[in-house]
């Protein structure tokens, strides 16, 4: 074994495990993309360079796709029957979460993305996915500001991979509050990397389900 792979202390062992875990996760993600002939990887921090604009652009965070294992862990924790729900991904990027949601069998999947170049990639990815899985859940893509996206009818799972700052998330939460008050429905919110979880914690129409370092889950309060 190469000497630089031999851990010499607890910290060295932790760093080695972290590198190995990172390599494995990248391999899993690449295998996922190859399965469907899509390209969803990479990290893109400058959304303006990808065509994003508007009053909330400066408050939007960069793109990083959710790991398939994390998305599936969220689904297990949510414990819903996806066939009765529409899944909405806020900040859908290249569309990995959309494909994962379609794999799960949601009634319908919707993605909203601010950056036109990421939206265009997602369109190609969705077309490639459906060419291999023609009977999978329908996926609709919207290019625009998530604050302006009306909530679709019916029961919903709303997915966020920390897509934007607190001010924008608060405006989206206001839309969710109005949608819950207008009609009785089930809503589950999945918040990966819950940096601004207090926004949903303070929403009186939601009940916390799960909170860990990786994600937070909420459900609508029974009425």
Image (tube, rainbow, N blue to C red):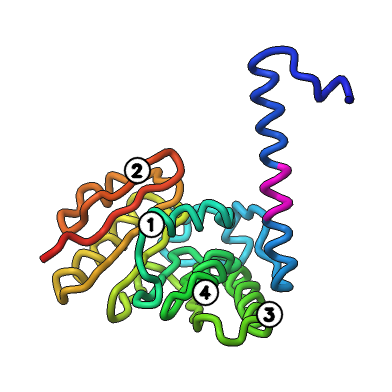
Q: Looking at the rendering, which quadrant does residue 154 occupy?
A: bottom left
Mark 3–mark 1 Cα distance, whole angstroms, equals 26 Å
Mark 2–mark 4 Cα distance, whole angstroms, equals 25 Å
Query: Residue shown at 35%/74% (left/top)?
Result: 85
The tag earlier along the polypeptide, 3 or 1, is: 3
Residue 51 visible in the snapshot: no
The tag earlier along the polypeptide, 4 or 3, is: 4
- Asked which secondary structure carries label 4, the reply is helix
- Asked which secondary structure carries label 3, the reply is helix
Residue extent of the magenta highlight: 23-28
- Asked which secondary structure carries label 1, the reply is strand
Please state the horizontal and vertical placement of residue 84, each as a whole percent of the image: 34, 77
- Asked which secondary structure carries label 2, the reply is strand
| Magenta run includes residue 26 | yes
Left or right of 204 on screen, residue 48: right
Which disc number belongs to residue 18?
Answer: none
The residue identified by callout 3 is: 128
- Please, is residue 157 above or below residue 197 in the view? below
- Towards the viewer: 11 or 170: 11
Which disc number belongs to residue 190?
Answer: 1
The tag earlier along the polypeptide, 2 or 4, is: 4
Which disc number belongs to residue 102?
Answer: 4
Please state the horizontal and vertical placement of residue 18, each as a whole percent of the image: 66, 33
Q: Are marks 4 and 3 in contact (CB under 8 Å)?
A: no
| Magenta run includes residue 41 | no
Which disc number belongs to residue 211?
Answer: 2
């Amino acid at each position: 074994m190469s000497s630089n792979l031999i851990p010499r202390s607890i910290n060295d062992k932790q760093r080695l495990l972290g590198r190995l875990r990172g390599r494995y996760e990248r391999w899993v993600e690449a295998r996922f993309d190859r399965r469907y002939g899509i390209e969803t990887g990479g990290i893109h921090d400058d959304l303006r360079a990808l065509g994003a604009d508007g009053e909330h652009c400066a408050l939007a965070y960069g793109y990083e796709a959710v790991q398939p294992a994390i998305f599936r862990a969220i689904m297990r924790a949510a414990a819903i029957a996806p066939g009765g729900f529409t899944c909405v991904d806020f900040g859908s990027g290249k569309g990995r979460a959309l494909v994962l949601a379609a794999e799960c069998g949601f009634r319908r999947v919707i993605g909203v993305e601010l950056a036109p170049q990421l939206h265009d990639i997602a369109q190609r990815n969705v077309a490639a996915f459906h060419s291999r899985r023609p009977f999978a859940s329908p996926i609709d893509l919207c290019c625009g500001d998530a604050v302006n996206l009306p909530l679709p009818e019916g029961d919903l799972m709303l997915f966020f991979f920390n897509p934007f700052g607190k001010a924008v998330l608060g405006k989206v939460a206001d839309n969710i509050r109005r949608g819950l008050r207008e009609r009785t429905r089930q809503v589950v919110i999945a918040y990966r990397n819950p940096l601004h979880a207090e926004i949903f914690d303070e929403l009186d129409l939601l009940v916390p389900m799960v909170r860990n370092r990786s994600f937070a889950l909420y459900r609508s309060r029974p009425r």
